Amino acid sequence: MAANLNQDRTIFIQETVSGISLPQADFSNRHFIGGTVQSFTMREGRCRYLHAQGTRFQNFSIDHVLGDQGHYQDCTWSGLEVRDSFLTGSHFSGCTFEATKGALSSFGLSVFSDCKLRESRLRD
């Protein structure tokens, strides 16, 4: 099921959210359960307090974004690209990262528990 990304909508259960480009936007306080987020691009925005469980993120790109206090459990990140962003105070548990890269970004105070990195580079 494809989801419509409405600004008022915050909960997505077993839905596909795709083709999102958000320049200078706020994508905070969203919850994703058992779905897919694909072809997501955010520049110069905020992505705070995101929660996801069993969600697949494909081609998820952020540049100059503040993303803190997120909680991600059993998620798969494929093609995650993080540039000049702060992903601080987040918790990643049981996540798999595939073909992921990060540059000049901070993952300070974030916790990675039981995560797998495949062809991925995440660095502070």
Image: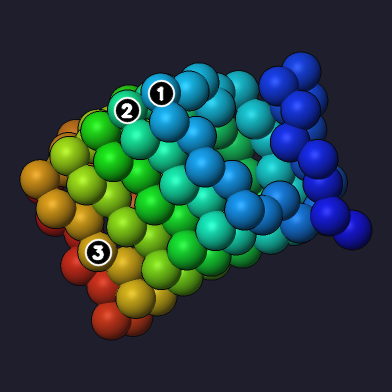
Figure quadrant of residue 10: top right
72 in relation to 26, above or below: below
Residue 122: horizontal and vertical position, in percent?
21, 59
Q: Is residue 38 visible?
A: yes
* Label number found at residue 101: 3
- The amino acid type of the residue labelled 3 equals Lys
Are the residues flagged by discs 3 and 1 in contact, CB closer than 8 Å? no
Looking at the rendered image, the disc whose residue lies closer to the viewer, 3 or 2, is 2
The Cα–Cα distance between marks 3 and 1, rounded to whole angstroms, is: 22 Å
- Residue drawn where x is 76% and y is 56% of the image: 16
Residue 95: horizontal and vertical position, in percent?
48, 62
Decide which of 46, 96 is in the foreground and name it.
Answer: 46
Looking at the rendered image, the disc whose residue lies closer to the viewer, 3 or 1, is 1
The Cα–Cα distance between marks 1 and 2, rounded to whole angstroms, is: 5 Å
Residue 42: horizontal and vertical position, in percent?
42, 39
For residue 33, side relative to residue 75 (left or right): right
- Residue drawn where x is 40% and y is 23% of the image: 24
Which sits earlier in the primary sequence, circle 3 or circle 1?
A: 1
Residue position marked by numbered label 2 in the rendering: 44
Are the residues flagged by discs 1 and 2 in contact, CB closer than 8 Å? yes
Residue position marked by numbered label 1 in the rendering: 24
- Check disc 3 and report its element: helix, strand or loop: strand
48 in relation to 78, above or below: above
114 in relation to 124, above or below: below
Q: Looking at the image, which residue sits at the far bottom? A: 119
- The amino acid type of the residue labelled 1 equals Gln
Which sits earlier in the primary sequence, circle 3 or circle 2?
A: 2
For residue 27, side relative to residue 81 (left or right): right
Decide which of 13, 91 is in the foreground and name it.
Answer: 13
- Residue drawn where x is 54% and y is 58% of the image: 39
Residue 113: horizontal and vertical position, in percent?
39, 56
The Cα–Cα distance between marks 3 and 2, rounded to whole angstroms, is: 18 Å
